[in-house]
Amino acid sequence: MGRLLHAEIARYLHDRTFWIAILVVILANMVVMTGGHQLEAPGREVLGRIMMKSIATMMVVGVYAGLSFGGDFERGTFSYPIRCGWAMGQTLLSKVLVFVAFMAFAIILFPACAIIWCTLANGWGAPFTLEEAAGFIGTAASLVVLAASTAMVPVLISVAARSSAAAIAASLVVTLLQVPILNGASALVAAHVLPFGTMWFVAKGDISPLYGIALGAAWSVALYTICAAILKKTDMK
């Protein structure tokens, strides 16, 4: 499966649309932060201030995800490795692993840059002990896993509908529907179920990073299992 993984990695690295999406994510977040004081926080606090404003990031990533993964089915490129002799399971797994890795990178990039910027400009905000380092690594790992799990939503829609338009629409709808829920009175309760919300509260320190990792992994496995079940009943050749 190494060759499949390598081909998928090369595909995204050379995809101009992906890098345009990254640029749009950065610009959108800079616009969102304009006039605010989020970037005046020390490095250890900035995540909690900006993750709740990541709606623009999720929308841009959702659109790209639909164009990319959903477009694979419209263009017939998803089934190409299968026609070349690779197993359906290997093809799906390789595509999903690389896809969610690149989507997680797109989601986490601006927060990572914000942490570096704020740490250089405003300091870390506390002595950087081993405990601080462990806590930061745990939070970062949790956010990466949760970001990957959110990318599984357009994957599932793409597999089910085999349409980029459906995947884009579903990604935007799912993201927008969560915003009022996560801003309501039961936000913390909802965040224990919805990965997007869990990202907010893990960043703020209100939910344990270990819980975030467990929830993100559970959602990813569940959605992947559904995708595999759908494709098992589909003739992709």
Image: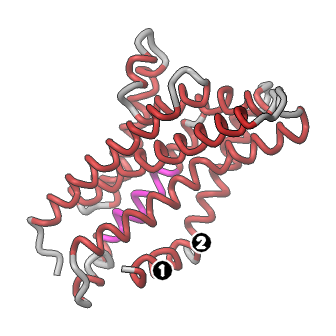
Three-letter amino acid code at the position of disc 2: Arg
Quadrant position of the N terminus in the picture: bottom left
Can you give x and y, in whole percent of width and height, for residue 85 in the image?
23, 89
On screen, 232 above or below 178? below
User: What residue is at 56 percent from the left and 67 percent from the top?
Assistant: 17
Q: Quadrant of residue 201?
A: top right
Can you give x and y, in whole percent of width and height, for residue 146 in the image?
46, 42
Q: Which residue lies furthest to the top in this view?
A: 185
Q: Residue furthest left?
A: 233
Three-letter amino acid code at the position of disc 1: His
Can you give x and y, in whole percent of width and height, for residue 194 in the image?
38, 31
Can you give x and y, in whole percent of width and height, for residue 105 in the image?
58, 55
Please, what secondary structure does the residue beneath circle 1 have? helix
The magenta span reads: 61-72
Task: Please state if 62 lies on the left or on the right of 202 as rendered.
Answer: left
For the residue pair 10 and 20, the one nearer the viewer reads as 10
Q: Residue furthest right?
A: 121
On screen, 221 above or below 80? above
On screen, 188 above or below 107? above
Q: Residue 6 carries which label?
A: 1
Q: Name the residue under label 2.
A: 16
Q: Quadrant of residue 225?
A: bottom left
Crowd around label 2: few <14 · some 14–19 · many ≥20 (10 Å): few
Distance in Å between CA atoms under marks 2 and 1: 18 Å
For the residue pair 35 and 9, the one nearer the viewer reads as 9
User: What residue is at 37 percent from the left and 69 percent from the top?
Assistant: 95
Q: Does the magenta stretch include residue 202?
A: no
Task: Please state if 197 lies on the left or on the right of 72 as rendered.
Answer: right
